[in-house]
Image: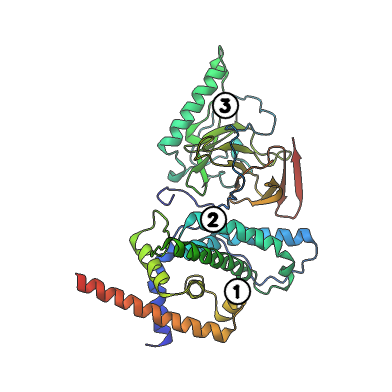
Amino acid sequence: MSNRAGRALAVASSVNSSSSTRLESDAELKDAVEELFVHCQGRVGRYLVQMVGDRALAEDLLQDSFHDALRSRTQLPQVRNREAWLYGIARNRALQALRKRRRFDRVLGRLSGGPTTSGDDAEIVAVRDLLVRTLSPEDRALVLLRYLHDFDTNELAEISGLTAEAIWQRLSRARTRLIHAARLHDDNEGEQR
Amino acid sequence: MTLLEEEAQLRELLAPLDRVESATLPVRKRHRSRRPALVAGFLAAAFLATGAAIADVNPFTSIAAFVGIGAADHAQTPQDVLDPTAAALVQKFNDGLTRAHGMFPGLAPQVLADTARLVGHLPDGHNIYVLSTTTDELCIVIDQMGASLGAPPSPSEPTTIGSFDKVVNGPNATPPISWGIAKDGITAVSFMGGGNEQIVPVVNNVWAYEGENNSLQSITVHYADGTTQTITH
């Protein structure tokens, strides 16, 4: 898929996440979720691929996230940041899927970090492997949301249900681990050369 | 190393992941289907033949079949040009149209390959093109899978609907895929599938759904202004 020239179906424009429109009817809530989804699905879809490393699974998770969002639409009037809310739903779906896959992998005795998406270049695969080897899925989710999707600590707290303090600590640890692992990786490569 | 330096280093380290292709159209895998392949006819009554071929010239003049389909209503770009597989499919489709008109092949509408516009692709990579015909109908081509021909979306039939099975029989049989081209302003379509109401977003005028469903019998379109319209057949 990635080798084909073409426009992705995902819409990349952003939605006003701080909208405070008062929503009353169920139909309005449904429409609001649909609109949110249409505007965010490109980025949420990318986040899911980054999380699970498998486009087919990410596509299923994207659809599941959409349905979860629709089912939870009554929360929307209380949601301060709708984008963060949608990412939170997607994150939960991704973690759930990774937990399932971890169990499955244990049964099979597999050692790899999971499937990769065909067409990804070596650099992408290497970074993904580094993340999988170094961080738990929960920390991976935070790191991706913070450094690739630009959510701040408070938004991450909203997405994950953790306190801002806990987020800060987790990110700090994750940064140290990742940078250390990347250095080790570079040193090993240097020695091999 | 300061926090800022550490964060900058991490961003640089993770940057390649920004290149991953996003997951796109959500596809629900539900009950498997073994029903015969169906390239559905579209919904509206056939257009009257005008016989006027439409040249794709620059500056761009709207092609009648693409009016109201924002994703296609623009000058052709290099990425819109049919790939060889899709071009072969269009040729085959045209041959079939000619054969179907028996003794009067000159009356057969023909799909105009040079009007192709790429409007998206299915999650498994098949490109979706729309093309005009000599009779201003809308042809939708999904490369390697099939093509369908019918009236473009209209106020009374605001979305086209097509459906087929990728692999009909055998151990690799796949569920049917339904898809359509919806008019501008439609944000989602919904119909019954797998016993539940399925709401499928419309992105760049395209929607697609994998799984048994009754969209050919009844489909509701959801407009951006909150209104809905149900079309039953």
Residue carrying label 3: B52
x 64%, y 62%: residue: A36
Q: Mark 3 lies on which chain?
A: B
Apparent side of residue B113 relative to residue B108 in the rendered image (left or right): left
Q: What is the x, y in percent for residue A169?
A: 50, 85
Q: Vertically, is B90 above or below B159?
A: above
x 48%, y 56%: residue: A55
Residue furthest to the right in view is A25
Badge 3 crowding class, 10 Å Cα cut-off, few under 14, some 14 to 19, many 20 or more, is few
Which element carries disc 3, helix, strand or loop?
Answer: loop
> Which sits in the foreground, A177 or B225?
A177
Residue carrying label 1: A159
Residue carrying label 2: A59
Which element carries disc 1, helix, strand or loop?
Answer: helix
x 49%, y 47%: residue: B124
Q: What is the x, y in percent for residue B20?
A: 44, 60
Q: Which chain carries label 1?
A: A
Q: What is the x, y in percent for residue B114?
A: 47, 34
Badge 2 crowding class, 10 Å Cα cut-off, few under 14, some 14 to 19, many 20 or more, is many
Q: Vertically, is B26 above or below A129?
A: above
Q: Are labels 3 and 2 assigned to the same chain?
A: no
Marks 3/2: CA–CA distance:
41 Å
Apparent side of residue B146 relative to residue B228 in the rendered image (left or right): left
Q: Which numbered tag is attached to residue B43?
A: none
Apparent side of residue B25 relative to residue B225 in the rendered image (left or right): left
Residue furthest to the top in view is B103
> Which sits in the foreground, B142 or A72?
A72
